[in-house]
Structure formats: structure tokens, C-alpha cells
Amino acid sequence: MDTLNENFVHFDIDLLKTRLGNNETVFKQLIELIKTNINLPVANMIGQLRTSLAQKDTITLHSTAHKLKGTALSSCFTHLAELASTIEKEKGLDTDAIEATINEIVEEVELIKQILP
């Protein structure tokens, strides 16, 4: 898979631009906001996922995953949304599987930071 197609799965820049009416000024402002949000609020959500998993608090785990999914979808981070959805839909408490998904989320966030314009 080439880099362009791989990045498309992680960050759908064309969809974001379309949602913004191809307004380049608004796009640049939103990208700056996204860069800020991916560092602190998303990091906090990841921390909350880990804490709620350790405490076996499925309600907080699922609600935090839902919140992360919404954040990812609004920013057009397709794969991050899919990963968060995996945790949100988890019926039981398969801690190994959830921990593995959280680790994938961390990797995905790092990749997104690298590909943001």
C-alpha cells in the first residue's frame, strides 16, 4: 500500500475540506485546533480508557470510547474512530483485547500527529 492511500485511512483530509466548504482559512484554523486537541484531550481520554479498564469500570470505559470515537469522526480520523468503536462495542471485559486496542489507539494517535499538515 502506498503512503498516500495509507494516510487516507488514517486522516481523510479531502472529506474534512469538503465538510468545511473547501474554505482554506477555516481548514488551517481547524488543523491547528486538532493539533492541540490530539495532544491533551485525546491523551486524557486514553488515560481514562486505561484507568477504567484497570478498575473494571465498563460504563466509563464505553462512554470514554464513545467520546473518543466522536472526536475522531469529527476530525476525519477514520481508523482511530474504528479502534474506539471496537472498545465501545465490547460486550464483556476482555482485558487483554481491550488493552491491545488501547495500545493500537496510542500508535494511531502518534501516526496522526506525523501526517497532519
Image (spheres, rainbow, N blue to C red):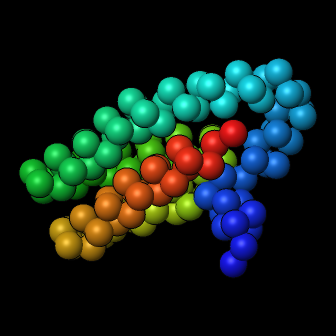
Q: Position of residue 13 (x, y in %)?
A: 75, 47
Q: Residue at x 32, y 61 (%)?
A: 103
Dividing the picture into quarters, in which one does residue 117 lie? top right
Side of 24 where 92 appears, left or right = left
Nearer to the camera, 89 or 109: 109
Q: Position of residue 94 (x, y in %)?
A: 21, 73
Nearer to the camera, 11 or 53: 11
Dividing the picture into quarters, in which one does residue 28 lie? top right
Q: Position of residue 41 (x, y in %)?
A: 40, 31
Q: Residue at x 20, y 73 (%)?
A: 96
Dividing the image into 4 quarters, which one contains the N terminus?
bottom right
Up/down of 33 relative to 39, above or below: above
Up/down of 107 relative to 90, above or below: above
The answer to whether residue 88 shows anywhere in this view is no
The answer to whether residue 99 shows anywhere in this view is yes
Nearer to the camera, 4 or 34: 4
Q: Residue at x 67, y 60 (%)?
A: 7
Dividing the picture into quarters, in which one does residue 91 lie? bottom left
Side of 14 where 93 appears, left or right = left
Q: Residue at x 39, y 30 (%)?
A: 40
Tell me how many marks there are.
0
Q: Position of residue 79 (x, y in %)?
A: 56, 61
Q: Please, which residue is most extreme toward the left here?
A: 55
Q: Please, which residue is most extreme toward the bottom here?
A: 1
